[in-house]
Amino acid sequence: MDAITQPPVIRLHPEDGVVIARQVLPPGTPVAPNVVAATRIPAGHKVAVRFHAEGEPVTRYGQIIGFTTEPVPPGHWVHTHNLAMGDFARDYAWGVDARPTDYVAEPATFQGIRRPDGRVATRNYIGILTSVNCSAHVADLIAQAFRRNPLTGEDPLAEWPNVDGVVALTHKTGCGMTQGEPLSLLRRTLGGFARHANFSHVIGIGLGCEVNQIGGLLEEQRLAGRLRSMDIQEMGGSRKTVQAGIDFVREVVAEANRVTRETVPASELCVALQCGGSDGYSGITANPALGAASDLVVRHGGTVILSESPETYGAEHLFTRRAVSQEVGQKLVDVMHWWEDYTSKLGAEMDANPSPGNKLGGLTTILEKSLGAMAKAGSTNLVDVVRYAEAVTQRGFVFMDTPGYDPVAATGQVAGGANLLCFTTGRGSVFGCKPTPSIKLATNTPMYERMVDDMDINCGTIVTGEETVQQVGERIFQHMLRTASGERTKSEEFDFGGAEFAPWPMGATM
Amino acid sequence: MDAITQPPVIRLHPEDGVVIARQVLPPGTPVAPNVVAATRIPAGHKVAVRFHAEGEPVTRYGQIIGFTTEPVPPGHWVHTHNLAMGDFARDYAWGVDARPTDYVAEPATFQGIRRPDGRVATRNYIGILTSVNCSAHVADLIAQAFRRNPLTGEDPLAEWPNVDGVVALTHKTGCGMTQGEPLSLLRRTLGGFARHANFSHVIGIGLGCEVNQIGGLLEEQRLAGRLRSMDIQEMGGSRKTVQAGIDFVREVVAEANRVTRETVPASELCVALQCGGSDGYSGITANPALGAASDLVVRHGGTVILSESPETYGAEHLFTRRAVSQEVGQKLVDVMHWWEDYTSKLGAEMDANPSPGNKLGGLTTILEKSLGAMAKAGSTNLVDVVRYAEAVTQRGFVFMDTPGYDPVAATGQVAGGANLLCFTTGRGSVFGCKPTPSIKLATNTPMYERMVDDMDINCGTIVTGEETVQQVGERIFQHMLRTASGERTKSEEFDFGGAEFAPWPMGATM
Ligand SMILES: [Ca+2]
Ligand SMILES: [Ca+2]
Ligand SMILES: [Ca+2]
Ligand SMILES: [Ca+2]
Ligand SMILES: [Ca+2]
């Protein structure tokens, strides 16, 4: 479909009173049934499709982005001259917009692996974790003995079709580190991975003299019985430890292979939401489309985890309005205060205000800017706020405190139990997060086509007008179900997802 | 040699006026010619072997550890009751102990690889660096296509005997990071590796939208012409980039193989000093023996790099006395002040004071405790102090500011140009740091024997009395020359040294 035949505007949510100009709209351009642009509307800017009284909330993605400062007739440009935050940012309005979830009558299903404890896995890996960087190479060598080569297709595990692989997740820390939260956070992350339903068996490898002792990790994270642990110093060196690790995998692989997929309800989905390498289309295609899919996941009884705290900063009022309780809303506000304090100590800055360039591009308020990323979570109630890598136990839309940086954020979400991850990208991020499959959503068609080896879903059809946000959201939801049932993502085909394990580095490296 | 026939004391330096009790010494035990213990001396404690007047400096490893607070006759126990820091810690005494270096008449030699620019390499690798974690997996896949398997011996580069390997050095950062020093430090580290003499060719792989843009890295670090750079987004995705990387290696490997080793002077050695997994023997065997070897390196015109700033904290006065100028000494003092500030901001603590347990073990002053680690640098003048990962340009004993944590510290030293690394360990660290060979020195014989697959040199012979500190120092020096000439270390045999690349994480992860 070429530019001439494209519809002139994008509607991001059925209930929005404004739509987005796809390109510069001359006065008189139709923008809705019986509504035409009253003046020239710049590309990417908002135009009203119905009358707004003075002081009325304006929504985008179904979310308030501000309040009109004068009456705005249909067809009129909406921007800084007639839209402002008002007192909104000073009022958390706990839960005023929380609504009963509109659950579907007959939830969708997928083919999952039900573990003996009742949890549902989407993949079946054998995991190798390390307490410290000192054991990383040993862990890598064990995994390499079983590695499928994505270039040649050679697969040492070919005779075990139900085992997705042996994955070593190593890191750069574990010693020379501060006690307290930095160590707790690392242990929470490792504990979350050790318990992840997508692992059938897990080995934990330490050196022996590190700050993050395996013994302490096992105790603090209650992992006894879950983890086969080995310290290199106790085993008599690296060569013997590698051999013992390989022997262990050979010992358990037949048992690991004895799983069958069965029909399970979509309520078993726990989907991590990510964006990275954003572009001008992120906020109008892939992010709101993923938001529509998130609403479907929640309406089918499942869970979505939004994170990337710095990208919510300044717009947390949107989520406090949707919080199921003041307590939950307050946890989110506390997270934002923590970030202010943390970054100021480290000489970094939290500033989500739209820049002059953002405003030229059509973003009016801080809420609207942050909503670009926050749209991924859709429009359901905020049911819980958890710490980095903390187990997600509530069903529905949950917020987890993480940095925005993709590998660190996703590592926290997978540790929290995510069994699927959806990653929107405009520039073309390449990303995996074993043991959880990562679905990549392109915001625009040219990038999708250029990087088709890495992209799973094209959301650029919203720009061309081939599909609506809701239609792409439905397509994403169906793709989630197929992926959760075992269909490999692009990044899994190419064996991504080991290098991207990145626990949040915090505290001083000593 | 069993315990009965062991000499009762260890002399750590020929000029020391005290020696260390190997075990509990009953009164009357001979401790030096014509000197016997006057009282019971606890194990690990100091006993005077000559008369010290009140206020006289007491040395250990040839370094002042404090001043007598009363006259101390030969044979007397030296501890907190008669030894104290006095005003020592308040006086930097710039350069009062600096002495002309006693260069050897005929420097030793090794078989090195002289690069066209005159620098000498000890190894010949092809390197793959990344700007950001997002390109880590792509870098790994390129390197894996050429990886020697240390378990089977299979070697895709077998026909290129002069190429030591293709190594991917990846990391967890490069985006979501603070501008300023955190980014500069990462770029300095990557720049130092990109320029390292031990690499014949280097590829730099980026994603395309990261904070640490390859373009900026090339410009800031003046790497144009040195690095073949590729952005995944520009190349059209991960699969095409891996193929291009493999093609590049195939294109240059014959040229990389065209090197010959030639006789070069030992002054071309640039030796990084490390300790990790220390034990009670570290300060009396491997560290002072490595110090004796360091003195030989410097007397042969070469360079040693001591680091691990937190382990020098509180004892920097020892090095300011040996600084070649007040300017150099002041740089060290500034480093220590930076650490005080940094750790206090992050809620960590700098405290090198001997603990009650340390004192029971025989450590009297902060100087003596820190000297355990500082002894690795020997006794020559401090000729320069450099920032983390900064190029080391002076010959002699240089201090580089790094954390104590092994992989992070060593990464800075190799970035600074170290072409050899010596790592002392009591508990048994396993460690490599490609492209630089890492020699592992065991502090005690039982650990050496238990972990012989990982340990290169046993310094436990000092405990048993089979060798003196000086003799082991000479043995280490000869081992350095052989390793620099191409003899593989234990960690190279087992392919260590990729996972341990760990640039110092600094600043907030956003
Ligand atoms: Ca398989
Ligand atoms: Ca992100
Ligand atoms: Ca070779
Ligand atoms: Ca250590
Ligand atoms: Ca160390």
Image: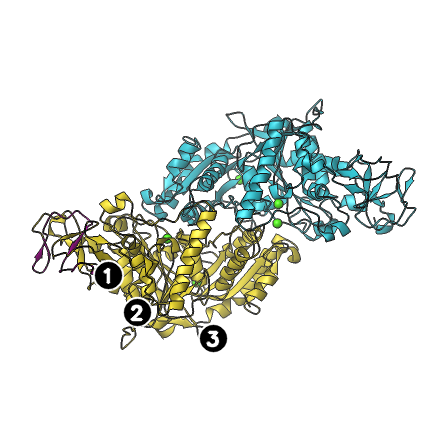
Chain colours: A yellow, B cyan
How far, Cα to Cα, is label 2 from label 3? 36 Å
Q: Nearer the viewer, mark 1 or mark 3?
A: 1
Give the percent coordinates (x, y) of residue A143. Answer: 51, 56
Give the percent coordinates (x, y) of residue B190. Answer: 47, 38
Which quadrant of the view contains residue B383?
top right
Identity, as a three-letter code, of the amino acid under mark 3: Pro
On residue A116, which mark appears? 3
Q: Nearer the viewer, mark 1 or mark 2?
A: 2
Give the percent coordinates (x, y) of residue A56. Answer: 20, 61
How far, Cα to Cα, is label 1 from label 2? 25 Å
Identity, as a three-letter code, of the amino acid under mark 2: Ala
In the shown orientation, is residue B64 left or right of residue A191?
Answer: right
Q: Residue at x 90, y 37 (%)?
A: B33
Residue highlighted by disc 1: A472
Magenta region, residue range: A30-56
Residue highlighted by disc 2: A98
Q: Residue at x 38, y 74 (%)?
A: A262
Q: Is residue B401 at all visible to an observer of this figure?
A: no
Disc 1 within 8 angstroms of ligand 2 (CB): no
In the shown orientation, is residue A471 left or right of residue B267?
Answer: left
Above/below status of A456 relative to A120: above
How far, Cα to Cα, is label 1 from label 3? 35 Å
Tell me which image quadrant ligand 1 sits in. Answer: bottom left
Element at label 2: loop
Q: Earlier in the sequence, mark 1 or mark 3?
A: 3
